[in-house]
Amino acid sequence: MSALRDWGHARDYVEMQWLMLQQNVAEDFVIATGVQYSVRQFVEFAAAELGITLVFEGQGEREIGMVAAIQAVDGQVLAHCKLGDVVVRVDPRYYRPAEVETLLGDPSKAKEKLGWSPTTTLRQLVGEMVRHDHASAQRDSLIKSAGFQTYDYHE
């Protein structure tokens, strides 16, 4: 959860790729935002989109995230979420004890030569993802409540 990553939106990266292809001479560019966030921060941004504030306990494979506060978002409060609920748990199948702690790209050449810099923040990216997934979950819930089947989207 402490690993730092340089996350960016595909929309920004595709724009940069297009700008690279417009050059008369091919060059190598680093496609990155130049900004790092921890996996924990990513999770906190996702929870905040749903009106949930998290508190984390433990470390490494035993770290959990629990609901510390719940607020309404667009006049709605998540009905099945309660204070103290554990909503984040590290899956041991995906835990890597020898994880690379920090990944950070340097997009300065792209900014200088292409005039490119990312326009979507991680918070905005996570917001898009959560809103889409939440809308899909609401749709599937409605479909199931009407007696129909839905696809299983889990990995």
Image (cartoon, helix red, strand yellow):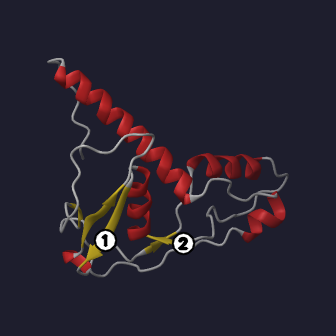
Q: Quadrant of residue 89?
A: bottom left
Name the residue that disc number 2 marks.
36
Residue drawn at x 78%, y 64% is: 111
- Residue 140 in percent (x, y) is at 26, 29
Question: How many numbered tags mark residues here?
Answer: 2
- Residue 117 in percent (x, y) is at 72, 59
Secondary element type, mark 2:
loop
Q: Is residue 149 visible?
A: no
What amino acid is labelled 2 in the image? Gln
- Given residues 76 and 50, the one toward you in this image is 76
- Residue 53 in percent (x, y) is at 36, 62
Q: Relative to 108, is 144 on the left or the right? A: left
Q: Residue furthest right?
A: 24
**154 relative to 66, above or below:** above
Q: Relative to 25, is 69 on the left or the right? A: left
Residue drawn at x 76%, y 57% is: 116
Secondary element type, mark 1:
strand
The first of marks 2 and 1 along the sequence is 2
- State the separation of the CA atoms marked 2 and 1: 21 Å
Q: Relative to 24, is 59 on the left or the right? A: left
- Quarter of the image that includes the N terminus: bottom left
Q: Quadrant of residue 40?
A: bottom left
Residue drawn at x 47%, y 53% is: 126
Name the residue that disc number 1 marks.
55
Q: Relative to 123, is 117 on the left or the right? A: right
What amino acid is labelled 1 in the image? Val
- Image marks 2 and 1: residues in contact by CB distance under 8 Å: no
- Given residues 111 and 71, the one toward you in this image is 71
